Image (cartoon, helix red, strand yellow):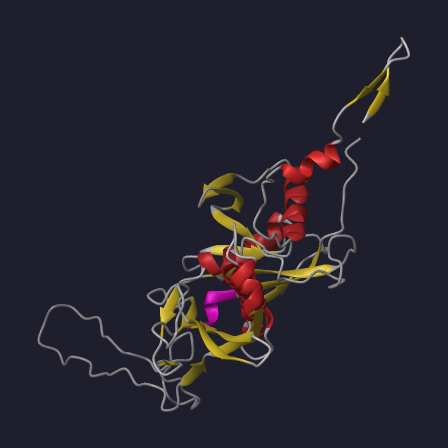
């Protein structure tokens, strides 16, 4: 680099671009902007299955109007209340459905192709195969979360019972709307699941009413709560324009669920111990071969599903408008 001072003397120095050729740079692992926290996968309890099937046995529902049933339409299990005496004791038994529902695992699969020459030579400081696998698995798990919510056959948005769906009163999600959802899923509600913009819209409505929601820290991250139930952000709940939800307005849904097998709630299903399983349960990776150009192919398979054990374990708040703002001047 040439520089002339005020005396007209020219000074020379090494140029930065040339000096970089002798320097070692600090490099990061490959970044992927589409990776999300996937809180839903962490909050959802996972239950192992065998042979890829989970059978839900239930108490028999009675369709005959002449037979006694409980408030849920199930066969009545009678228990008589009497004073302590020698009266006859009521006889009863729980009866089960003869054809119970069965949930089968689904799979997200892809074939990862990797040039073995690249893996051999360009392998420092980061292992090329490991980074390729890591990024592919991240994308597969993003798809897994999307399917658990939106799959037309078993996704939570589609399997929620008709009587467990309510609509917002005015579009924007208000405390009254979430209270109504809590009245539906009142048996040990675990968490709301909502798009970040829906959570922001709910926060604005709370601020307008002067009842800002309380924030708590779970797993090292802050979550706002309503009535003690956390609102968990998930961008797999679509908002209006699916292609660019950051900019367009529109409507979405908010889910509320009870979770856990013991609570007859919502559970995730997976089958651990499958051949060639990785560190992630139910995710297998096997070498499919190397062709005559030195390209190695790896088949990655992720098995999973979701089950709602009782219809009152899942509620949906529909028609949630996220584009309403208030002027506080």
Residue displayed at 23% across by 83% down: 92
Image coordinates of residue 42 in percent, x first then y, are 45, 57
* Vertical side of 45 occupied by 109: above or below: below
State the residue in front, 194 or 208. Answer: 194
Q: Quadrant of residue 286?
A: bottom left
Q: Say which quadrant the C terminus sits in.
A: top right
Position of the N terminus by quadrant: top right
- In the rendered image, the residue lying farthest to the left is 86
**Which residue is pictured at 39% across the width and 66% down the height?**
46
Of 222 and 168, nearer the camera is: 222
Residue 175 part of the magenta-drawn span: no
Residue at left offset 8%, top offset 76%: 86
Whether residue 165 is visible here, answered yes or no, is yes
Segment tinted magenta in the rendering: 309-314
x, y (%) of residue 305?
47, 74
Q: Is residue 36 left or right of residue 274?
A: right
Instruction: Give residue 245's position: percent from left, percent from top.
Output: 73, 57
On screen, residue 52 versus residue 199, left or right, reads left
- Quadrant position of residue 281: bottom left
């Amino acid at each position: 680099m040439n520089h002339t001072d005020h005396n007209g003397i020219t000074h020379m120095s090494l140029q930065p671009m040339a000096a970089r050729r002798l320097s070692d740079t600090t490099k990061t692992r490959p970044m992927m902007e589409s990776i999300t926290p996937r809180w839903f996968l962490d909050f959802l309890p996972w239950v192992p299955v065998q042979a890829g099937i989970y059978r839900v046995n239930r108490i028999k529902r009675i369709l005959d109007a002449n037979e006694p049933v409980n408030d849920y339409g199930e066969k009545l299990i009678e228990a008589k209340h009497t004073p302590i005496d020698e009266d006859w004791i009521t006889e009863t038994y729980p009866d089960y459905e003869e054809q119970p529902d069965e949930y089968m695992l689904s799979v997200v699969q892809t074939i990862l192709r990797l040039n073995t020459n690249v893996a051999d030579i360009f392998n420092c400081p980061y292992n090329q195969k490991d980074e390729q696998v890591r990024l592919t698995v991240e994308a597969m798990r993003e798809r897994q979360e999307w399917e658990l919510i939106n799959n037309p056959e078993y996704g939570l948005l589609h399997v929620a019972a008709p009587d467990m769906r309510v609509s917002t009163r005015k579009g924007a999600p208000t405390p009254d709307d979430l209270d109504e959802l809590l009245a539906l899923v009142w048996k040990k509600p675990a968490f709301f699941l909502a798009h970040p913009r829906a959570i922001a819209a709910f926060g604005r409505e709370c601020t307008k009413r002067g009842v800002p929601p309380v924030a708590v820290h779970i797993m090292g991250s802050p979550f706002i709560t309503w009535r003690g139930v956390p609102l968990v952000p998930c961008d797999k709940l679509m908002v209006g324009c699916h292609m660019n939800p950051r900019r367009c307005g529109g409507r979405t849904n908010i889910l509320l669920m009870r979770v856990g097998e013991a609570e007859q709630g919502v559970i995730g299903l997976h089958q651990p111990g499958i051949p060639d399983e990785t560190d992630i349960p139910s995710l297998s990776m096997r070498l499919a071969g190397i062709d005559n150009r030195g390209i190695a192919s790896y088949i990655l398979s992720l098995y999973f599903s979701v089950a709602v054990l009782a219809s009152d374990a899942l509620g949906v708040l529909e028609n949630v408008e996220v584009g309403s703002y208030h002027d506080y001047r």
